[in-house]
Amino acid sequence: MSTSDRRVIVAVATPLEPGLVTRIAAVDNRLEVRYQPDLLPPTRFPGDHRGVDGFHRTAGQEARWRRLLADAEILFGLPGNSPQALAELVRENTGLRWVQATDGGAGEQVDAAGLTGQELDRVLITSAGGVHAGPLAEFAMFGILAFA
């Protein structure tokens, strides 16, 4: 198999609307997007990428969860929204190459994970910082105009 035919496994590790998962999968036919919403916490509101507090998986679900993440090359979201879970995954899955964090403040979670320089060289970690800058600026201007 040539590198242009190689499958790239993307694991969704955060609650996400099914339509957005479909959009990720549609980016390239080489992507194998793994998404099992029953292994993720129920959401509290639309767009919630953390889910309800106190969510726990059964032993069987935890085994499925670990298999889902075991050979992912790309991860969408920090598993469990937890620095400790991120550190475990980076150390267990040596094929992991990229983590796309969904929360603001992801840098603090990465720092708290205590990843080594070698681990950080191997795994690119990006955040969604700034994606709401335009709408927030519009909202601020609306607020100013409402009081004017």
Image (cartoon, grey):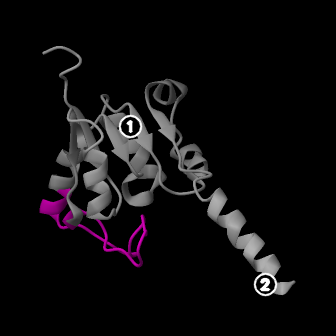
Is residue 3 placed above or below 130 in the rendered structure?
Answer: above
Is residue 62 placed above or below 56 in the rendered structure?
Answer: above
Q: Is residue 102 shown in magenta? A: no
Is residue 86 placed above or below 15 in the rendered structure?
Answer: above
Residue 113 in picture, x, y percent from top left: 51, 45
Is residue 92 placed above or below 34 in the rendered structure?
Answer: above
Q: Secondary structure at mark 1?
A: helix
Q: Residue furthest top?
A: 2
In this view, the residue in front, 123 or 141, is 141
- Answer with the quarter of the image where residue 123 lies: top left
Counting labels gives 2
Say what amino acid the circle numbered 2 marks: Ala
How crowded pointer 2 is (Cα within 10 Å; few <14, some 14-19, many 20+) is rated as few
Residue shown at the point (44%, 44%) measured from the top left: 100
Q: Which contiguous range is marked in magenta?
A: 38-62
Residue 49 in picture, x, y percent from top left: 42, 64
| Quadrant of the drawing holding the C terminus | bottom right
Residue 117 in picture, x, y percent from top left: 54, 26
- Answer with the quarter of the image where residue 48 lies: bottom left
Residue shown at the point (45%, 56%) measured from the top left: 82
> What residue is pinned by disc 1?
90
> What residue is pinned by disc 2?
146
Q: Is residue 47 shown in magenta? A: yes
Task: State the predominant SS element of the stretch in magenta.
Answer: loop
Query: Are discs 2 and 1 less than 8 Å apart at CB?
Result: no
In this view, the residue in front, 22 or 55, is 22
Residue shown at the point (28%, 54%) measured from the top left: 21
Residue 17 in picture, x, y percent from top left: 31, 65
C-alpha gap between disc 2 and disc 1: 48 Å
